[in-house]
Amino acid sequence: MIDFCLITVTYNNSNYIQYLIDSIIKSSGNSSFHLFISDNNSTDIDEIKAICLAEDNVTLIASKHNYGFCKGNNIAVSEAVKLDPKYFLFINPDLFLTEDWLENAARIIEDVSLIGVLSGPLLQFDFKSKQATGLIDSLGINITRYGRWFDINQGCRRTDFIADVKPQAVCGALMLLKREVIDALLQADGYVFDERFFMYKEDVDLSLRIKKLGYQILVHHELIAFHCRGWNRKRKEMSFRAKKLSAINDMRVAYKHRLFNLPFALFKFFYVFCVEFFYSK
């Protein structure tokens, strides 16, 4: 048995991988871990292979197709279960853990009963300057009354103290699950991530499915991590494909979990396909 199996899905992310691995090593303390890198046919696969060859506890799963975030994770889960880990950590390649994060997370998830997904405050990190911006990236994910999902306090100035949060969902960049939760998901649905989502809102769907199994969601203030995602990208700079996937998946989430939010999801869908599609030409 191993303590942690970490899974990251990559697509042309080789520049982050060594930083990710170094942060995992610093965060592990006395805990044992193994990192699975599930690559979706990246053009920089040779760089990723070179990094993995230098590490004893890293396995690269190199796919010949871009299967997306969800299937990429599921492929790695099927391999990770063979190591019989206590915990699974789904982590983005552009996310860096703080010192002793894994050990602290194991203590917290065991001390607090019925926690199905554990995460921590994600703080924005500028990879070019290798500095934190001082702003919050996500304290979990909540939803407005009319149905828009949003990252809690994104873009707000970080304060000295961040309270624990019990949100509706947590960002898929950092999700810690006990083995029993993985087993419960596989027994109930036959999968961990719903591959119909490909990417976007898959973290919301997973969080809500776990809550339906009777577990709780927690963002614990001690578990700070740094995230380099493109948080400064304006909507008009997003590709039409990204907007399309997000709109379709909003409808999937509403249909599966929150039918009363379906009107907003439909409005967003028609706005993307009728208005934003026109301006994308």
Image (cartoon, rainbow, N blue to C red):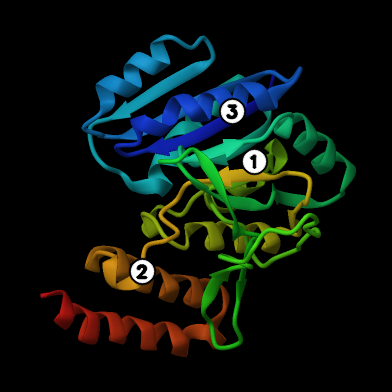
Q: Quadrant of the N terminus?
A: top right
In the displayed structure, would residue 244 be above or below residue 127? below
Q: Which residue is mark 2?
A: 234
The percent coordinates of residue 268 (x first, y second) are 37, 83
Q: Which residue is mark 1?
A: 183
Which corner quadrant of the image does residue 176 belong to?
A: top right
Tell me how far mark 2 sits from mark 1, CA to CA: 38 Å
Secondary element under disc 1, as helix, strand or loop, is helix
In the displayed structure, would residue 98 be above or below residue 2? below
Tell me how far mark 2 sits from mark 3, CA to CA: 29 Å
Q: Residue at x 16, y 74 (%)?
A: 280
Q: Earlier in the sequence, mark 2 or mark 1?
A: 1
The percent coordinates of residue 218 (x first, y second) are 75, 55
Q: Residues within 10 Å of mark 1 (few under 14, many from 20)?
A: some
Q: Earlier in the sequence, mark 2 or mark 3?
A: 3
Give the amino acid at mark 2. Answer: Lys
Tell me how far mark 3 sits from mark 1, CA to CA: 28 Å
- In-front residue for pair 44/170: 44
Q: Residues within 10 Å of mark 3 (few under 14, many from 20)?
A: some
Decide if residue 197 is in sight here: yes
Give the amino acid at mark 3. Answer: Ser
Which corner quadrant of the image does residue 128 belong to?
A: top left
Give the amino acid at mark 1. Answer: Asp
The percent coordinates of residue 199 (x first, y second) are 39, 55
Q: Is residue 26 left or right of residue 114?
A: left
Secondary element under disc 3, as helix, strand or loop, is helix
- In-front residue for pair 88/149: 149
- In-front residue for pair 50/179: 50
Q: Which residue is mark 3?
A: 23
Q: Residue at x 74, y 21 (%)?
A: 29
